[in-house]
Image (cartoon, grey):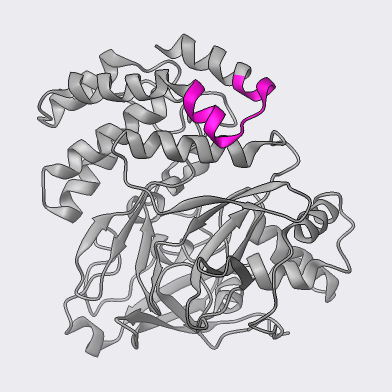
Amino acid sequence: MITNVDRLSVSIDLDGKEIEVGELVRSQKKIYFKYHTDFLGKGINISPFKMPLTNDILTADINFFDGLLGVFNDSLPDGWGRLLLDRNLTAQGILPGKIGPLDRLAHVGTGGMGALIYRPAIPPPGMKVDRLVDMDEIAKQITQVLEGNSEDVIDDLYKMGGSSGGARPKILVGYNRHTDHLITDNENMPEGYEHWIIKFPSSTDRPDIANIEYAYYKMALDADIEMSQCKLFKGKSGREYFGTKRFDREKGKRFHMHSASGLMHDNFRISNMDYGHLMDCAFKLENHVGAYDKILRLATFNVYAHNRDDHSKNFSFLMDHTGKWRFSPAYDLTFSFSSHGMHSTLVDGESENPGRVQLTSLADQFGVKNPDIIIDDICDVVADWKKYAKEAGVSKMSFELISKTLHGMM
């Protein structure tokens, strides 16, 4: 096991070709980055707001990303992925507190979300690409990890989910929709397999969290919010698990993904970000007023559907091989509370009980036409919660709990 990494080469996969971007160096407890001259000539900016294309040496202007610039912090697993890596290190006699962010990026290596690649990489032990996935068994293993009894299963779970972000346990898989087979994730998928993520309940989730999130997916589609394809996967026991197709992978190609948190250097754990900041960010990257409508629609959905875990890591942008950016499909849309009970992202300065007044004010600031139509459309969709809950198999107890809350939002 390699530790105390002081230098990493950063590359990006553009249209299936790996291109060197620059180099990360740790010196005297600070981390520096310098672009390669050849990459500067391409005129493609992997982080437009915080990393200008320059020959100068760059360093972060904040310290809550452990000294990393935001785009590289986006590559690091957090929540479940970080827990798996820490448990894996501990099992090998390495204290997680003794390794730094460059060590963690080396563990990400070639397998991170998005298109960035870090070398030299520290790959996990090998796993057969055609190994079929037993979701019920993985759910049992995840319970062992959450209960602290993980010595026998941590390696396999780390291979399947060690690069993932977010708090909920999850695995990265290959899915063949024609045969309905799931196999362990691999960068070079066999013919017919696509990259998917499957989520599992955490210790604090409702037992039918998968069904709830699937109902929200269906609601979001009817609210004209773009999402990647999602479905419920059924284990041998009949238990269901929520899965979504990855939008950073498509037919063997990777797309550079950058969160709003990383783009704007926003600390998503104690954020002051407003949906207005997100609207401004989206317009600057897309250079089209349609970006305002998309963000307003998503903000409205999160308000009336009571998705309060709407922090800045739950919004992302995608860059293609030409350097063109767009707002990513929405993700992690479900009935939720934040750690402090309020919206993680402010709505025109309000986080406790935002509503039509704040949404309309937000729309007026950015010149969105006919905001009442957007708000009314989404309210109509959310008011039909009973239909979505029934179709998704949400339990009676969860249905009634959510219904009571949503009714109070209208």
Measuring 51% from the left and 77% from the top, which residue is drawn there?
A: 27
Residue 7 point in image, percent of width and height: 51, 84
The verdict on residue 398 being magenta is yes
In depth, the one of 347 and 319 nearer the eye is 319
312 lies left or right of 175: left
Residue 51 placement (x, y as % from top left):
28, 66
Give the main secondary structure, helix, strand or loop, of the magenta stretch.
helix
> Is residue 375 visible in this depiction of the protein?
yes
In the picture provided, is 33 more to the left or to the right than 210? left
Q: In the image, residue 282 lies at what x, y percent?
A: 23, 48
The residue nearer to you, when weighing 121 against 405, is 405
Coordinates of residue 97 in the picture (x, y in percent): 72, 63
Magenta span has 100? no
The quadrant in which the N terminus is found is bottom right
Identify the residue at horizontal 41%, vertical 60% (top origin): 70
- The residue positioned 62% from the left and 48% from the top of the image is 167
Q: The C terminus lies in which quarter of the figure?
A: top left
Above/below status of 41 relative to 200: below
The residue at the point 83 percent across, 76 percent down is 92
371 or 191: nearer the eye? 191
Q: Dividing the picture into quarters, in which one does residue 5 lie?
A: bottom right
* Vertical relation: 131 (above or below) 210: below
Instruction: Specify the segment rendered in magenta.
Output: 386-399
Q: Is residue 99 visible?
A: no
Who is closer to the viewer here, 203 or 184?
Answer: 184
